[in-house]
Image (cartoon, rainbow, N blue to C red):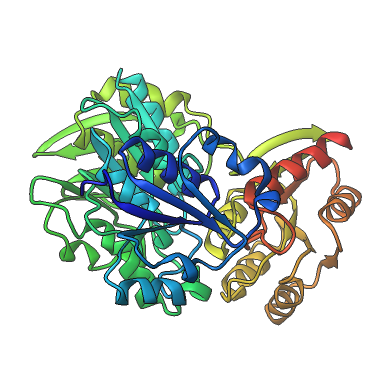
Amino acid sequence: MEYEGKRVLVVGMARSGVAAAQLLRAHGALVTVNDSKTEEALGNSLENLQGLELERRFGCPAMELLEGKDVLVLSPGIPDTAPFVVRAREMGIYVIGELELAYQLSQGTLVAVTGTNGKTTTVSLLGEIFRNAGRVTHVVGNIGYPYSLAALISKRQDVTVCEVSSFQMETADTFHPHVALLTNITEDHLNRHGTMEVYTEMKMRMFARQKPEDWAVFNADDPGLQGLSRQVRSRVMKFSRKKEVREGAFVRDGEIVLRMDGEEKTICATEEVRIPGPHNLENALGAVCCAAAVGVPVPVIRHSLRTFKGVEHRIESVRVLDGVEYFNDSKGTNVDSTLKAVDTMEKPTVIILGGYDKHTSFDPLSRRMQERREMIRHAVLIGETAPQIEDSLRKAGYDAITKADTLREAVSIARETAQDGWNVLLSPACASFDMFKDYEERGRIFKQIVNEL
């Protein structure tokens, strides 16, 4: 779409909304920016709008600003069912999200990754692989760096690796990745999407615009993905750590093997993959498929798997104190993600759980903790969901539970409980919004508390 001279309303002034306004002005749009918060409350988040010619309408409802607009651009936090969004569509206004806008105005090869868990690690690893291959690479999207900022500078020969959330897919229109990867699907964000069927449909929208020459990559081990690959028109690769696949990446005799166009290539031994845990082996296998689809040579992929250290806030070792190792897994914002962290622990562990309620069941996690009782020795509960988690744990027969009012108190209790040779793991299984701005702030504060001990 051509945006020059179009009257565009951008709603939501978090990072992606601010970046969308910058991109639109660069393409000659007449931009109005809006947020329900006042300009004073938004503070430093508006710094990048300084010097731009646009209309600022803060502290007022978006509904009042729709008249005369051609386009409405939404930040991911705004559901497409919001009354002003519904009204905008009724008025004939073109409604899209920041992700869709950035896609329309960017250049280069697009590799997109979605799924309930593993997205951030996979896109970060892919960014490393493409950079090691000598490609100018932009790692963008739900990872925290807005796609719109990359769209301002992207060139035809660049690679963009985009982490895509189900929220962003609600307002996607022409979004078309050359390579698209679905890591897994488990229960999450039901407070937004309502049902698993709708949640799955949002994930699958990422493949809707693909063509037969594109690639779709699926996790063959995830039960939530069964049959979904038959819905796509593009070429399919799968990955598995449990069985061989016809086309894609798998594990055989302790080695990662890539099978593509009837030819097999050994990448490296599984024990050489630097990031720990079976879930990270899955992430690595998915990244192998995507990199191969874009033509990255095997030696580059091999080197990247051997050297990639992982991402902040995902089973990140913070420090060892008095023989106890502290791990920051603040990115464990849902039950399945924390299940993977629990399975990674190889020493007796005190786990800190709890946060914002996304209306999901904690029973699968409670059962796993009870099964691994010799390893997961104690749970410290915080936040809005602490009562629900306690009920779920006790129902599963797990009763080594303490509650804390703050994260600092939780760390103090964990320190008193853990013995020499143990772990302390922050992996909340919940979002952070009841106590923190986001999971990153929660993780940074946890690390600060631990480093002050």
Q: Is residue 128 above or below residue 386?
A: above
Question: Measuring 9% from the left and 45% from the top, which residue is drawn there?
Answer: 213
Q: For this view, does 13 lie left or right of residue 355? A: left
Q: Position of residue 178 (x, y in %)?
A: 20, 43
Q: Quadrant of residue 351?
A: bottom right
- The number of discs equals 0
Lateral position of residue 428 relative to residue 110, left or right: right
Of residues 438 and 69, the one nearer the viewer is 69
Work out whether 44 lies above or below 429. Answer: above
In this picture, residue 295 sits left or right of residue 21: left
Above/below status of 325 relative to 362: above
The residue nearer to you, when weighing 98 against 427, is 98
Relative placement, left or right, of 352 versus 358 is right
Residue toward you, 86 or 243: 86
Would you say residue 116 is visible in this rendering? yes
Q: Is residue 188 above or below residue 45?
A: below
Residue at the spot 13% in from the left edge and 53% down from the top edge? 234
Looking at the figure, which quarter contains the C terminus?
top right
* Foreground of the two, 173 or 270: 173
- Residue 193 place in picture, x, y as percent: 44, 74
> Which residue is at 49% across, 72% downward?
192
Residue at 27%, 67% (x, y): give it. Answer: 226
Q: Is residue 330 visible?
A: no
